[in-house]
Image (cartoon, rainbow, N blue to C red):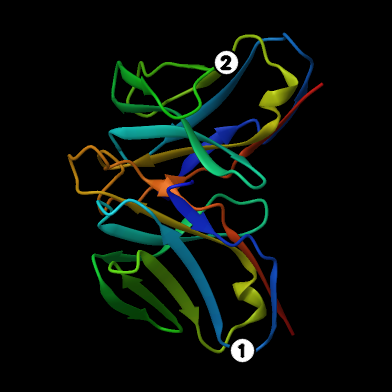
Amino acid sequence: EAQVTQNPRYLITVTGKKLTVTCSQNMNHEYMSWYRQDPGLGLRQIYYSMNVEVTDKGDVPEGYKVSRKEKRNFPLILESPSPNQTSLYFCASSLSRGGGRETQYFGPGTRLLVL
Amino acid sequence: QKEVEQDPGPLSVPEGAIVSLNCTYSNSAFQYFMWYRQYSRKGPELLMYTYSSGNKEDGRFTAQVDKSSKYISLFIRDSQPSDSATYLCAMSGPYGGATNKLIFGTGTLLAVQP
C-alpha cells in the first residue's frame, strides 16, 4: 500500500530535550516536505527536499532541522524544543516539486506537546 | 493580507443539504486549485483538482474556479455524515515558476448532522 508513515504519532516532551520525528514514504517520490498545522494558521511549510541531499527552508524553519540521506526518509529534528513548537506536524511527499498539478500525499500526523 | 483566505467555520448542516465551501486568493499567478479533505486525527488527502477557470464535477462534489474574481468554491450535494471533516483549499502557480509552491487555506470545519 502506498503511504507516508510518521513516528511517533503522539509525543510529550520538555523544553530543550532534543527529539526526532521520522517520516518515510514507499512511493519513490522525489519531493518531501514537513508542515505544521495550528488553529487559525492552517498548514505552514517548515522545510522541503527536492531530492537526496537537497533541502531548503520553507515558511517557518526556525528551530527545526532536516536531513535527506535516503530518498524514502526525511526526519524532522528539534534540537532544543520550545513550547511554541507545540503543534500538529505532517510529513508529505509528491512525485516532484509539489506545485502545479502534483498531488501531495500526507502522513497521519504527529501531535507534539512541549512543556 | 494572507495569500489565501478561507472561512474557518464551523459549518453545521443537516444530512442531504447542499454545502458550499469557499476560498479567496490574492495572487493572480495561481493556476492550479485543489481541495483537500482532512478527517479528524488524519492527514489531508486530495479530494479534487482544477486547472485554471471553470467547473469540475466528481460524483456529489463540484469544484468551481473564477479567476476573474479570485474565488474558488467546492459544492457538496446530498451531504452525508461521512462528509464531516475539515476542507482545505490549496493552490499554486505554474510548475517551475516562482509561485509553484502549494499554498493552503486555513480550512473549514464541516459537520453534517444525521
- Amino acid carrying mark 2 in the image: Gly
Q: Residue at x 38, y 60 (%)?
A: B34
Residue B13, given in percent of the width and then of the height, sits at 69, 82
Q: Left or right: A44 with respect to B102?
A: right
Q: Nearer the viewer, residue A103 or A37?
A: A37
- How many marks the image carries: the answer is 2
* Percent coordinates x, y for residue A11 in the rendering: 73, 28
Using the image as rendered, state which of residue B110 and residue B80 is in the foreground.
B110
Quick one: A29 or B85, which is closer to the camera?
B85
| Residue wearing tag 1 | B17
Labels 2 and 1 share a subunit: no
Crowding near pointer 1: few (<14 within 10 Å), some, many (20+)?
Answer: some
Residue hosting label 2: A63
Say which residue appears at 57% left-offset and 57% top-offset.
Answer: B107
* Residue nearest the viewer, comparing B58 with B65: B65
The numbered disc on residue B9 is none
Q: Chain of mark 1?
A: B
Quarter of the rendering containing residue A48: top left
Q: Residue at point 49% right, 69% down? A: B22
Label 2 resides on the chain identified as: A
- Say what secondary structure mark 2 lies in: loop
Residue B51, placed above or below residue B80: above
Image coordinates of residue A23 in percent, x first then y, are: 49, 30
User: In the figure, is residue B84 to the left or right of A106?
Assistant: right
User: Secondary structure beneath disc 1?
Assistant: loop
The amino acid sitting under disc 1 is Ala
